Image (spheres, rainbow, N blue to C red):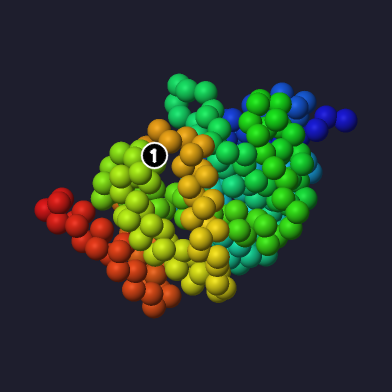
Amino acid sequence: MNKSVVVVGLGEMGSVFARGFLRSGYTVHPVIRGVSMQTVADEIECPELVLIAVAEADLHEQLVNVPAVWKDRIALLQNELLPGDWQKYDLEPTVISVWFEKKKGQDSKVIVPSPVFGKHAQLIADALAVIDIAATVLADEAALLHELVLKNVYILTTNISGLEVGGNVGQLWEKHNAVAYDVAIDVISLQEALIGQPLEHQQLIDGMVKAFNGDREHICMGRSASVRLQRALTLADEKGLNLKVLQKISDTTQTQKE
């Protein structure tokens, strides 16, 4: 019997996973822009896995429309992801915290192994292994939460610090350590508010630095940096948090634009 996987979104990241699934012997059914998941679900009712690989900004639009027959086989890979993002839709997805980079015209570049948790975790890890991308299957939900928070701390700290100092992550930690540390503490405070529990600050900063060392040339400021900063400040405002360091960087960047 032919094994099937559905990939929703075939951008750079979705295409990497699709290649891994194909190399593992699965038939890959794409859901491209302009096609509804339900249309594909009407034909492919029982795929092994449905990987939603759209960008963060498009995620909730997809989650609210997950066909009922697919609800127990969803997998997610977005940045800035926390359990609350899927729990509101009554989903229990397999989740991977992606620690490899894929840019147009370039091969995938692994920073550190990508942790994955959920009932389809091994399937995803095996598919990535076939294309030489390291992944680690996690033991429990607590481990997943830590890894998601860690990735958020890394992404937000590097992007937001980059708005202030530019450069790459090696330079950030060596030459602008105070900026990176202060931004990270604000980001961790936001994560604590979003998940409703305290976090081990130093453990997260140590994990962030380990990722820095995995690719010291990684540029801090991605094209979404300003959007990430404003989203963080909006979330902080909703939680009644005053993130002084992030607000100062926002004010400075706004002044520079004017």
- Relative placement, left or right, of 157 versus 61 is left
Q: Which residue is found at the position 65% from the left and 56% from the top?
A: 144
* Residue with the most extreme front position: 174
**Amino acid at pointer 1:** Gly
In the depicted structure, whether residue 30 falls above or below residue 93: above
- Relative placement, left or right, of 188 versus 92 is left
- Relative placement, left or right, of 232 versus 118 is left
Indicate the position of residue 92 as horizontal and vertical percent values.
70, 59
- Relative placement, left or right, of 121 versus 87 is right
Q: Which residue is found at the position 31% from the left and 49% from the top?
A: 176
Q: Which residue is found at the position 51% from the left and 43% from the top?
A: 211
In the depicted structure, whether residue 80 falls above or below residue 31: below
Q: Please tell me how many numbered marks the rendered image carries.
A: 1
Q: Which residue is found at the position 30% from the left and 68% from the top?
A: 244
- Report crowding for label 1: few under 14, some 14 to 19, many 20 or more residues within 10 A (C-alpha): many
Seen from the viewer's position, the closer of residues 182 and 35 is 182
* Residue with the most extreme bottom position: 240
* Residue with the most extreme right position: 1
Quarter residue 131 falls in? top right
- What element does badge 1 sit on? helix
Seen from the viewer's position, the closer of residues 89 and 152 is 152
Indicate the position of residue 130 as horizontal and vertical percent values.
71, 26
Indicate the position of residue 73 as horizontal and vertical percent values.
74, 49
Asked whether residue 215 appears in the rendered view, the answer is: yes
Seen from the viewer's position, the closer of residues 128 and 214 is 214
Residue position for label 1 = 170
Indicate the position of residue 191 as horizontal and vertical percent values.
49, 65
Asked whether residue 28 appears in the rendered view, the answer is: no
Quarter of the image containing the N terminus? top right
Seen from the viewer's position, the closer of residues 86 and 125 is 125
